[in-house]
Image (cartoon, rainbow, N blue to C red):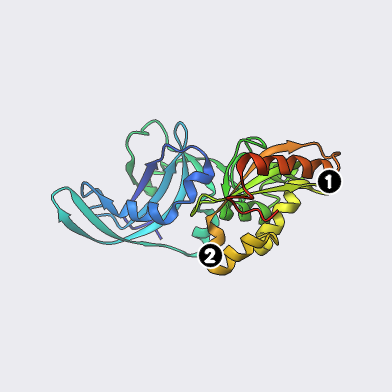
Amino acid sequence: LFNSSKVKLVRHKDSRLEYRDVIKDRDKLIEYQKEQAKDIFKGVDYIISFIGLENSKALLFGFFRVNGVKKVKKDKYVYELDEIKEEWCNTFNDRVVIDWGKGALMWHQWYDISKNKSKEVIEILPKGYLGEFKGLTNFIIDFQELEKIIKNPDANRDWKTHLSSVNGIYMILDKKTGNQYIGSAYGKNGIWQRWSTYVKNKHGENKKLIELCNSSNNYHKNFQYTVLQSLPSNLSAEEVIKIENLYKEKFGSKAHGLNEN
């Protein structure tokens, strides 16, 4: 595809280091890429885009065909970029991490395959990989991220191991309204098992969450999940529920939130 074409490699440096934060703004990043202050894609047939990670690492973002450009004003060029969505592209997008090299400040570079100057591939991430597990109370994930974890347990072994080994108190935040739901997980496979239910039916059989999900087909995408406190797996259901009720009082989630009782 690229042998006789003029190709540029592009590295968009993003200050957010975590892999999951880089990839979830994909549509926004594609639009951002189309607008440039200079005509940097002049004479280019294809661009291979990467997201800059820590140091000189770069994550493969996608392959794009340059179909034209419009000069909107003196310092604004808008390109028509069509993403190549063939199977081989999808296989490696969001998975291949390369070493961009010493010229990290040069964020766009000509790629000449005939000179055999390729970038070093550092790693190929598992398909469905979310990111490094930072600790039971050190993360906040949205529904799409939770779904990725639950549906790709082999790629996210650390997440499954930790979330299934403890009981705990968790919060679901409705980002649209700011309302909160406090819940607890106990028994076999702990938090992992409880959160798997949310991925399966979006609401976990909770009355007010059911009402919200019924109000819009995609309302569950407003939900954000976090663990407030991890608890030993040998605690009884009664002990866990007692701690859960204390959190409901602290956050006022019964009077002003999403808890029914």
Q: Amino acid at mark 1?
A: Ala
In this picture, residue 213 sits left or right of residue 11 = right
Q: Nearer the viewer, residue 83 or 133?
A: 133
Q: Few, some or many C-alpha atoms within 10 Å of disc 1 (few <14, some 14-19, many ≥20)?
A: some
Q: In the image, which disc is placed on residue 218?
A: 2
At label 2, the amino acid type is Asn
Q: Is residue 228 above or below residue 126?
A: above
Q: Do callouts 2 and 1 mark residues in contact (Cβ within 8 Å)?
A: no
Splitting the image into 4 quarters, where does residue 251 fall? top right
Nearer the viewer's eye, disc 2 or disc 1?
1
Viewer-nearest residue: 28 or 5: 28
Q: Secondary structure at mark 1?
A: helix
Q: Is residue 192 left or right of residue 226?
A: right
Q: Along the horizontal axis of the image, is 189 left or right of 258? A: right
Side (left or right) of 116 relative to 212: left
Number of residues whose C-alpha sits closer than 10 Å to that of mark 2, classed few (under 14), some (14–19) or many (20 or more): few
Residue 81, disc: none
Q: Secondary structure at mark 2?
A: loop
Identify the disc placed on residue 237. 1
Quarter of image, res 248: top right
For residue 45, what is the image quadrant?
bottom left
- At 32% from the left and 36% from the top, the residue drawn is 106
Where residue 168 appears, as percent x and y from the top left, is 74, 42
Residue at image point 49% right, 37% down? 17
Q: Residue at x 83, y 49 (%)?
A: 188
